[in-house]
């Protein structure tokens, strides 16, 4: 089910995001049309929430910078989930979190196939 979360911004103002609510425990009754119109207040700012995922991003980019054959372009895709209590977490695909990493070589550094 979807719900709205209001995240304040450090520079002032706020942003409201729509998130997928965690599934209820089995056996609990949940109203069919339960979409909250009034946003819940997040426990911190959007910037504070995003700070939680930066160490993972830095770890991945740090390892890629250590490659012997430097790519001309690096593309990293991952999802971020926002929640009122946890802030931001790297979104999982199934039971595992994942990063999609694509490396490109366009110049003389192009690896031989």
Image: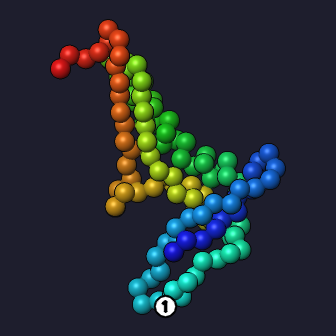
Measured along the vertical axis of the image, is residue 66 above or below residue 21?
Answer: above
Q: Within 10 angstroms of label 1, few (less than 14), some, or many (20 or more) residues?
A: few
Residue at 71% across, 56% down: 15
The single residue placed furthest to the front in the displayed view is: 33
Whether residue 42 is visible: no
Residue at 42% across, 24% down: 73
Q: How is the image coloured?
A: rainbow
Whether residue 111 is visible: yes
Pointer 1 residue: 29
Residue 100 position by quadrant: top left
Measured along the vertical axis of the image, is residue 12 above or below residue 30?
Answer: above
Q: Position of residue 41 (x, y in %)?
A: 71, 67
Measured along the vertical axis of the image, is residue 6 above or below residue 31?
Answer: above
Which quadrant holds the C terminus? top left
Q: Position of residue 26 (x, y in %)?
A: 41, 85
The single residue placed furthest to the top in the displayed view is: 108
Task: Report the front residue among 75 and 53.
Answer: 75
12 on left or right of 41: right
Residue 36 position by quadrant: bottom right
Query: Could you tell me how many numbered marks the image carries?
Result: 1
């Amino acid at each position: 089910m979807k719900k709205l979360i209001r995240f304040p911004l450090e520079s002032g103002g706020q942003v409201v995001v729509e998130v997928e609510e965690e599934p209820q425990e089995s056996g609990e009754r949940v109203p069919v049309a339960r979409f909250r119109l009034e946003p819940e207040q997040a426990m911190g700012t959007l910037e504070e929430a995003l700070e939680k995922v930066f160490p993972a991003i830095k770890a991945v980019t740090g390892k890629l910078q250590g490659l012997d054959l430097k790519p001309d372009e690096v593309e990293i895709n991952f999802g971020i989930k926002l929640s009122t209590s946890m802030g931001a977490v790297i979104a999982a695909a199934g039971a595992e979190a994942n990063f999609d990493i694509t490396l490109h070589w366009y110049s003389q550094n192009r690896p031989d196939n």
